[in-house]
Structures are given as C-alpha cells and as structure tokens.
Amino acid sequence: MLLTGVSGTGKSSAIVALRQLGIEAIDTDEDGWRVPPAGPPPHGPAALAEVQPDWLWDEPRMAALLAAERAGPLVVAGAVENQGRFLDRFDHVVVLTAPAATIDERLRTRTTNPYGRDPDQRARVLAELQEVEPLMRRHATRVVDTTLPLDQVVALLVADLGA
C-alpha cells in the first residue's frame, strides 16, 4: 500500500500506529529513502509533485524494497515527484487528506518535523493541497479524511491491507 498526501495530512502518524500493530511500514521522509534530483526539478501538470520537490525517492532502493518477498503487508508513506514510477507495484494507493485549516494548524504546531512551521512552507503546502492532491486522487483506491480519529484512520488502512 502507498500512503500519500500533502504534508500535514497524517502520513507519519499513521505509519507509527501501523508499526505498533506489527505491520511493516516505511516512512520515506526518514533518512536514506530520498535523494536530490540529478537535474532541474521536473515540472508540468501531469507530474505528482511533492511538498519538497527538491527530493525524490531513491529509485534503486525503492525498487528493491517493493520487489522483496515478505510474509505480511507493506505500507510505504510519502509524496514525491517520482512516486508515479512505482504506482503499478502497489495494491492500494491511499490519499490522506484534511481541510486546509486543519493542515495549517498541524503544520504550525507539529513537534516531530520542522517542515511547515515557516509561513512560506505552509503556503506552499496549502497550494499543493489544491494543485497536487487532485492528481494524487486520480490514482487512489481510497481517500481518507484524517480529521477522523487516528484509530479510525488506521482501522480503514488495516481493512484495506486485509491484516
């Protein structure tokens, strides 16, 4: 399962909760999963842009992760420009979403990640909510409003995993 959405929608919180349930869950915001692009940042309306477009998934590492045999489900969380190259390798693509005011508040008050505390960063995320989230939804098997309590969000994800 790919868990995606703009910054502040709850991807990292969901990953932590899934890990606590014993589900293999990767947060690609963690070190080692992202690399800077080799050339200028990609542009265009068809692209799935990330909130921080100067980083891409490390494609060889992601390909190896997705190709590995495993006994149980895998959840990968992230929102990067090149995630579209891997969409066909996920059984489910879940877009997490929330109203702009909720995302703005989460970004201003978050303690686990400094991204979004700066007003320019928050403005960028809110623009991505309008411009990029609709592109993400095109590939979604489910869209989850994360104003629901976290345990309900996680229950929906676990149901999709069949875990």
Image (cartoon, helix red, strand yellow):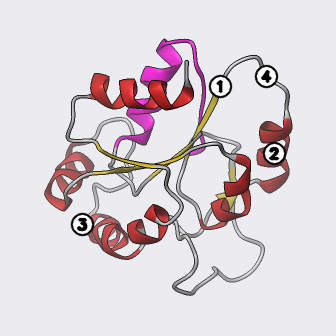
The disc labelled 3 sits on which kind of residue? Pro
Relative to 158, residue 52 above or below: below
Of the residues under marks 2 and 3, which one precedes in the sequence? 2
Q: Which residue is mark 1?
A: 73
Q: Could you tell me which residue is drawn at 28 percent across and 55 percent down?
A: 117
Q: Which residue is mark 3?
A: 119
CB-based contact (under 8 Å), mark 1 and mark 3: no
Q: Which mark is residue 61?
A: 2
Q: CA distance from mark 4 to mark 2?
A: 16 Å
Where in the figure is residue 25, as x and y percent of width and height?
A: 59, 28
Q: Residues within 10 Å of mark 3 (few under 14, many from 20)?
A: few
Q: Give the secondary structure at mark 4.
A: loop
Q: Could you tell me which residue is drawn at 28 percent across and 68 percent down?
A: 126
In which quadrant of the rendered image does the N terminus lie? top right
Q: Which is more toward the observer, 153 or 25?
A: 153
Front label number (4 vs 3):
4
The disc labelled 2 sits on which kind of residue? Arg
Q: Is residue 1 magenta?
A: no
Relative to 77, residue 123 above or below: below
Q: For this view, does 69 lie left or right of residue 29?
A: right
Q: For this view, does 67 lie left or right of residue 81?
A: right
